Image: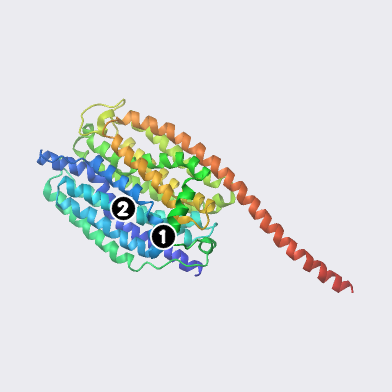
């Protein structure tokens, strides 16, 4: 498969994700706000948005252990096609407006997400070489995260001048998002299988489902993976902010006035802007980062550093109890919309850095085992995303943001330490390959010289 074909695969995959997540990310971003609105109309409704997302990500995390086995049977392209059905069921569950339906939809979606994201990482790696993995991840991320712009722009206007999200508005939003999700299912039919001519594709192990599960456990108990789990834990908790918690905090801060509810969608849009900017930045600098032995660490460290700045601004800009629901409480400073949306952008930039640099590192650490290593990374990440949403019902914003700053610093240290070890091994390996090539050329060169003299 030629370079142009591999690039086409990456771009088309990004477009498919763009359509699918225009639907899902928008609904996920709104879930807490929508469920609170249902509760306002029906006091007997006992559903909670954070608990629903806890179930979703717990299901996501648990099902990741099965994802490599499923991919070994169907391949990454067909696995992603199947998984889109779970996303559609999740959106449709909001028509019923019953806790059991929304919770069940979240559990089904979590299992589907485990398949989708493991297959996505596997697909990107199989269409890449070591020199193109960061570039291809950046290309995919730009298309994928542009989904935040479309869905949240629609919701921003749908929520205009509304302090309460009434049922007719909820039905309109759900119908539009459901239609978009069904469109993505059709588009995934046309996703081509990855080629087999890249370095990563040639090294990929094609074993059966049982062997894939056993190999996943071996990778999970690897010492380097254990150390990296601290970084994975941070990415999971920050994912909670990106996936709706922080946007809900803006919407619950009634100091912002009538525009407060619209800020939920506007925050999601700015998170998307940050994600796109981060993906474009890494795509542009991919050549430079590949040449630096510490290029991956620079990319991830930049992402965490930007997010830490965002957490510090959140602490002073939003009320501590804005996590729990509507509040007129004041923050340390007068709550400022511009600062709030800047924090959303910072969250997006950081998130894009993690997803590209961690996949790039895992592809180098476990060549031929991409589906297993990515599934295990997502397992730890989603487990802590679920824990974060559960924690949000009990821990205020300031305490959460403080924990994130501390864990973020730890995440940089652990990632850089493992990246340094892996980079050194890669340099030694490259030098050995070069030396062996030179040794093969040298005898032939001497033989030619002798023949010439004779």
Say whether marks 1 and 2 touch (CB < 8 Å): no
Chain-order first, disc 1 or disc 2: 2
- 446 or 377: nearer the viewer: 377
Give the label on residue 351, or none.
none
Residue at left offset 17%, top offset 40%:
36
Q: Can residue 312 be seen at all in this image of the molecule?
A: no
Secondary element at image label 1: helix
Q: Residues within 10 Å of mark 1 (few under 14, many from 20)?
A: some
- Residue reaching furthest to the right: 454
Give the answer, above or below, for where 299 lies relative to 74. Answer: above
- 400 left or right of 225 in image: left
- 103 left or right of 291 in image: left
3D distance between C-alphas at marks 1 and 2:
17 Å
Residue 305 in percent (x, y) is at 46, 37
Give the answer, above or below, for where 343 lies relative to 196. Answer: above
Q: Can residue 230 be seen at all in this image of the molecule?
A: yes
- 267 left or right of 142 in image: left
Residue 72 in percent (x, y) is at 42, 62
Q: Give the number of the mark in front: 1 or 2.
A: 1
The quadrant the C terminus occupies is bottom right
Residue 212 quadrant: bottom left
Residue 176 in percent (x, y) is at 20, 57
Secondary element at image label 2: helix
Which residue does the numbered mark 2 point to in the structure image? 111
Residue at left offset 35%, top offset 56%:
115
Which residue does the numbered mark 1 point to in the structure image? 209
Residue at left offset 82%, top offset 70%:
447
Q: Residues within 10 Å of mark 2 (few under 14, many from 20)?
A: many
- 18 or 65: nearer the viewer: 65
Residue 219 in percent (x, y) is at 49, 49
């Amino acid at each position: 498969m030629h370079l142009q074909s591999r690039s086409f695969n990456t771009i088309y995959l990004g477009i498919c994700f763009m359509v699918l997540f225009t639907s899902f990310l928008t609904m996920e971003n709104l879930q807490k706000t929508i469920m609170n609105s249902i509760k306002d109309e029906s006091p007997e409704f006992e559903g909670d948005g954070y608990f629903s997302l806890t179930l979703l990500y717990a299901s996501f995390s648990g099902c990741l252990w099965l994802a490599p086995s499923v991919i070994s049977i169907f391949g990454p392209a067909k696995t992603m096609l199947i998984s889109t059905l779970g996303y559609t069921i999740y959106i449709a569950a909001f028509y019923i407006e019953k806790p059991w339906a929304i919770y069940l939809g979240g559990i089904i979606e979590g299992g589907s997400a485990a398949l989708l994201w493991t297959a996505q990482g596997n697909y990107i790696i199989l269409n890449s070489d070591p020199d193109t993995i960061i570039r291809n991840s950046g290309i995919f991320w730009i298309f994928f995260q542009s989904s935040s712009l479309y869905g949240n722009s629609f919701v921003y206007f749908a929520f205009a001048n509304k302090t309460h999200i009434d049922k007719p508005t909820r039905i309109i939003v759900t119908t539009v998002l459901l239609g978009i999700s069904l469109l993505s299912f059709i588009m995934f039919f046309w996703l081509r299988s990855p080629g087999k001519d890249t370095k990563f594709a040639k090294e990929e192990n094609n074993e059966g489902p049982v062997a894939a599960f056993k190999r996943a456990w071996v990778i999970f108990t690897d010492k380097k993976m254990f150390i990296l789990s601290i970084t994975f834990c941070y990415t999971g908790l920050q994912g909670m902010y990106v996936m709706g918690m922080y946007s809900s905090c803006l919407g619950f801060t009634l100091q912002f006035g009538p525009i407060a509810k619209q800020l939920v969608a506007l925050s999601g849009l700015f998170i998307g802007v940050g994600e796109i900017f981060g993906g474009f930045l890494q795509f542009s600098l991919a050549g430079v980062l590949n040449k630096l032995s510490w290029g991956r660490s620079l990319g991830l460290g930049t992402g965490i550093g930007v997010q830490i700045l965002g957490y510090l601004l959140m602490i002073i800009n939003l009320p501590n109890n804005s996590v729990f629901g509507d509040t007129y409480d004041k923050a340390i400073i007068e709550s400022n919309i511009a600062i709030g949306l800047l924090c959303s952008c910072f969250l997006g930039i950081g998130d894009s850095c993690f997803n590209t640099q961690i996949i790039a590192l895992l592809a180098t650490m476990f060549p031929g085992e991409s589906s297993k290593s990515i599934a295990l990374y997502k397992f730890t990440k989603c487990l802590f995303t679920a824990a974060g949403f559960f924690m949000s019902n009990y821990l205020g914003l300031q305490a959460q943001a403080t924990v994130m700053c501390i864990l973020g610093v730890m995440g940089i240290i652990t990632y850089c330490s493992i990246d340094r070890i892996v980079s050194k091994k890669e340099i030694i390996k490259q030098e050995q390959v070069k030396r062996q090539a030179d040794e093969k050329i040298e005898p032939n060169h001497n033989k030619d010289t002798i023949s010439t003299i004779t």
